[in-house]
Image (cartoon, helix red, strand yellow):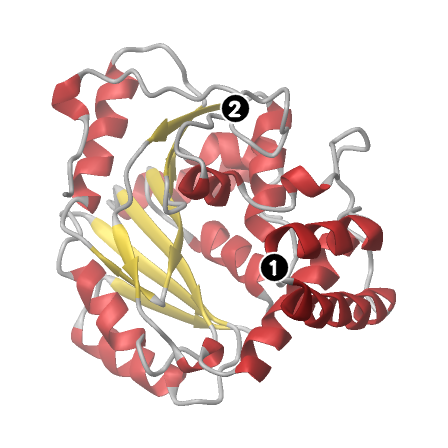
Amino acid sequence: MSDPASHLGAKAESGVRYSFLTTNYEKADVLERSLESLLDVLPAESELIVVDGGSTDGSVEILRGLEACDDRLRVVVSPSNLGEGRQIAFERARGEICVQHVDTDRAYTPAVRDLLEVFAELEERGEHDDLVLCTLDSLYASRPGPIHEAGGWPPLGRVEERVFVERLCRSGATLRVLPVSLSRELPTTDTASARARARKWRLTARDLLRVGFSLRTLFRYDHRRFRWPKALVADLCCVLGAYDATELNSIATEPDAPRGAAVVESWQEVLRRQPDFLPDGERAILSPADVSTTFPENVWIDLR
């Protein structure tokens, strides 16, 4: 990881205030729509960094074309998995404020600007200098400091966000939730077929096992979530993921973090299915330790 002091010095000289950070792999069918929806609403003095993990579907050519037309877009092509790509983007960021976990298979709304206004208002209160503001669709706005303190993004191909949130909680960062979604999913070909979805779950299982979940826990999760025919297919994906995990290094996290079936899902997914459930940092350490839904009404964003 790069030195935080030199990282912050480069930011001061760049004149960039906001860095929006994302990764891409094999999303050529929706990539242009996604990035243009974001470029259309970026505030002044912004940059958008896209790290492509080595796509072979024409994504790189699309990215280079967009980069040539818009000097706010910076493209990095680096063979990397999802978590590695997010860390590369973070280390290249020059902004005073980073918006992370942007995805290239989602369309973003103009209300992304409002996320930054809410962040600024919370900062002006002077309550926390380690604030990380997150949305229900997993955008994270913060200064670079709390991310450095937490150790950044884990080098995982899937479930990287769960470990990222755990690291933030364990580092003592102040996480607050703005209970809105600022994007919508764009259906992509990489999840259009049963084979593609099975491959995705195999990779997810692999990385859950790499951060300490047990195979038994994943089986229990499958049978809680799916009807039994689909659960058996998911179980097979888990077994294949377990084989894959033996070929890779494990990822060290806090040894006493829970690894039960209740926390296999990210806290965002739990909130979607149980809107009245607000994790408190005790029952599920992968959830923000300081959840707040008590913002004044004039800073809430209503997208309905």
Across and down, in percent, residue 228 comes to 68, 64
Q: Which mark is residue 185?
A: none
* Helix, strand or loop for disc 1: loop
Marks 2 and 1 in Cβ contact (< 8 Å) = no
Residue 183's place in the image compared with 240, above or below, is: above
Q: Is residue 42 left or right of residue 279?
A: left
Three-letter amino acid code at the position of disc 2:
Ala
Residue 248's place in the image compared with 32, above or below, is: above
Q: Which residue: 64% across, 39% down? A: 263
Pick the residue in front: 211 or 100.
211
Pick the residue in front: 209 or 23.
209
Q: Residue furthest front?
A: 228
Q: Which residue: 63% across, 19% down? A: 282
The CA span between labels 2 and 1 is 35 Å
Q: Which mark is residue 226?
A: 1
- How many numbered marks are there? 2
Q: Is residue 14 left or right of residue 113?
A: right
Q: Which mark is residue 173?
A: 2
Q: Which residue: 59% across, 52% down? A: 160
Circle 2 Cα neighbour tier, 10 Å, few/some/many (<14 / 14–19 / ≥20): many
Name the quadrant of the C terminus. top left
Quarter occupied by residue 170: top right
